[in-house]
Every structure is written in C-alpha cells, then in structure tokens.
Image (cartoon, rainbow, N blue to C red):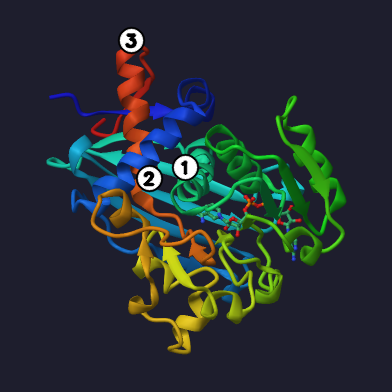
Amino acid sequence: MDTRTMMIGEETVRECLTVEDAIGCVERTWTWYGEGKVVMPNKITTDMSALGVPSWFNSMPAYIGPMDAAGIKVVGGYDENKKLGLPYIKATVLLTDPRTGLLRAVIGGDRINDLRTGAQPAIMARLLASRTDTVTIIGTGLQGYMSLLCMSRVLDIGEVRLSDLSEEAMDRFIARFDAPKFRFVKCRTNEEACRGSDIIVTVTNADADLVQREWIKPGALVMTMGSYRETSFDTVLKADRIATDHVGQSLHRGNVKELAEQGRITAESFDIVVPDVLAGKAEGRRSADEYIYAQIIGTGMLDVALAALLLEKLRAAGKAPHFFDMAK
Ligand SMILES: NC(=O)c1ccc[n+]([C@@H]2O[C@H](COP(=O)([O-])OP(=O)(O)OC[C@H]3O[C@@H](n4cnc5c(N)ncnc54)[C@H](O)[C@@H]3O)[C@@H](O)[C@H]2O)c1
C-alpha cells in the first residue's frame, strides 16, 4: 500500500484552485453539513498571548462524507508577521486517510484559507441580502479583499464603501481590483461607510465597537468575520433576525462571544443557520425590510473540502506533487 504523503506548496494551490472552485465548494460543503453528511467538532483556540507570544492558533478538524475526506486545518493570527513580510493569518491543512490514519497530504493552507473565507460572505449575501447595490467593507486587509473579490463574482454591486484605520491599506485594496464594475468610496468614518448601505462586512483584527445599530437601515445585512468583537451589542441584540454559519463556534469566538458569555445570546438566539437553509430545512430571509445580523465564524470543514478538491483536481490534471514517506 502507498504510505507516501503529498507535499503541496502554496504555488500549486494558487495555480489549481479558482475563486469559482471555492464558491462552489463552500456552498456544497455547507449544504452537506446541513444534511448531516459532515462530522465537525468545534474548533479549539490555543491563545499564546498570556505567555507573552502575541499570537493564537486554531485546530479545525472535519470529515466530509460525500468526499470521503478527513483532515484538519491549523491556522492562526500572528501579530508580528507583518514586520516579517508574512500575512497576519498563517495556515496549514493536513489530510489523513479516513480509515488508516495515514497522512495523505500536507498542504500550504494560506490560499485555501483565503479562498474559503472570501467565499462565505458571497454565498451568505446571495442567500440573505435583500439588496446588493451598496457594499461596505470595514477592514481592508487580505480577508476583506478576498470577501469582496468573491462577492463581486456573484452579486450585482454598484458602490463599495471602504473604512480602515490605515489609508494605505484602503489604497492597496483598491489597487488590487483591475477595472472593477463598481465604484469605490473611501470613507472617513465607519458611520459614513455604514449609513444607507445594503451589506456591511466587518473583517478586521480589532476588538472594538466598529458598527452601531442606529447606522443600519431596514433590510440591511451585516456580516461580522473578525476573530474578536466588531459591533455594539445592540447591533446583534436588536437585529430582526440573527444568522450564523455555525451555532456552537459562534458562541465561542468572534463578535458574539462576549454576549454568549453574559448569557444574552444562546444557541436558541440564532434564527437562521445557513447550512440548514441551503439544505432546505429552514427559512432564510422573510421580508425585504428585516435587518439581518450574521456571524461568519469560519469552519474547518470548508478547508478540508477545498483541500480534497485540490487533490481531485491535481489527480485529474495528471500532476504529480512531491512525496515524502513518513514510514522511512
Ligand atoms: N471568519 C472567518 O472565516 C475568518 C477567516 C480568516 C480570518 N478571519 C479574521 O479576519 C480578520 C482579518 O484578517 P486579515 O487576514 O484580513 O488581516 P489583515 O491584517 O490583512 O487586515 C486587517 C485590517 O483590519 C484593519 N483594522 C484593524 N483595526 C481596525 C479598526 N479598528 N477599524 C478599521 N480597520 C481596522 C487593519 O488596518 C487591516 O487593514 C482577523 O480577525 C482574522 O482572524 C476570519
């Protein structure tokens, strides 16, 4: 039996996986999860900051039944990476044989993480937004870019409003879009960016009230994606309906965490669980003017599924990656 492990670097991932691959894969995997065809425990965070290391990493395992793929993403946020020319988020995906435990592949996980992260708000917005003319991105870093890139492939967007602490980050963000079909507006305040907007995405590494409830118009969709607090409590508590990609994980991390710790948000507070909507088990938006708040926490099943898709595509293209034999 073949005991070898494939070693796949970021360059190969970039060549092989497209934005469309990611959007299709995330939608299918969420649907399978809603149908009960995925096994996925909650992610575990190892926060090293208490011992003076300004970093954390998550362990995110999953088994995807329809792909017969098992694995784990190890991904973290490393505050000092920017100084070293590395991205803030650094990820690796491991795929194991579901029956023998043999290590099948070690894959550079940055591009996989970025693609699946951006695909999430695209699918959620397609499912839950009542209008898509104006989109606000608060936090114009890498995940903000991937989010808009993916959203722009599936939504009809007229205006994109940007807000970031760094003017340079906003300029870099705009420069990454070649001849976009929408116009960019750099905003001086988050309030200016949010008032009247149809879709608001927060994707920062801040721990602050970046969005206030009174800035949000009826019918809007607010999606928070950062790892810490990003809105006022009222933005969540006074939403007409609360949505998530995953209930358990949303209670442990991200914007809703503090509210969950205070007992003001519980598992029952979530009205819309997106995988259940995709599986046809639950209802999405009910009216054009309800304000929906959504927590996108990000789940390991998406990385494992996208990594398994990468292997399928490499096999189909007859491309042989490097191998390493753990048994030797
Ligand atoms: N939900 C998910 O699936 C998922 C997946 C990956 C990463 N993330 C999270 O997304 C966040 C962003 O990651 P990234 O890779 O884009 O980081 P990044 O460093 O590339 O970008 C973060 C941006 O946020 C801006 N920012 C920080 N504080 C701000 C504030 N108070 N107001 C406005 N802008 C502010 C920074 O200037 C920067 O431009 C992190 O919290 C990360 O953990 C979420």
Q: Is the CB–ligand 1 distance for label 1 below 8 Å?
A: yes
Q: Residues within 10 Å of mark 1 (few under 14, many from 20)?
A: many
Which quarter of the rendered image does ligand 1 occupy? bottom right
User: Where is residue 266 drawn, in percent x and y?
Assistant: 38, 81
Indicate the secondary structure of the residue bearing disc 1.
helix
Q: Is residue 68 visible?
A: no
Label 1 vs label 2: CA separation? Answer: 6 Å
Q: CA distance from mark 2 to mark 3?
A: 24 Å
The kind of secondary structure element at disc 2 is helix
Which residue is at 87% across, 59% downward?
Answer: 188
Determine the image quadrant of residue 98: top left
- Is 195 or 167 nearer to us in this picture? 195
Q: Mark 1 sits on what residue?
A: 116
Which numbered disc, 3 or 1, marks the residue closer to the eye?
1
User: Which mark is first along the chain, 1 or 3?
Assistant: 1
Marks 1,2: beta carbons within 8 A: yes
Q: Earlier in the sequence, mark 1 or mark 2?
A: 1
Report which residue position mark 3 lands on: 318
In the image, what residue type sits under mark 2?
Leu
Q: What secondary structure is marked by label 3?
A: loop
Q: Amino acid at mark 3?
A: Gly
Question: In the image, is residue 143 above or below residue 180?
Answer: below
Q: Is residue 23 left or right of residue 238?
A: left
Q: Residue furthest top?
A: 318
Residue 287, compared with residue 116, is above or below; it is below
Q: Nearer the viewer, residue 294 or 173?
A: 294
Q: Residue at x 37, y 51 (%)?
A: 300
What's the mark number on residue 302?
Answer: 2
Q: Amino acid at mark 1?
A: Arg
Between marks 2 and 3 in the image, the one whose residue lies nearer the viewer: 2
Disc 2 residue: CB within 8 Å of ligand 1 = no
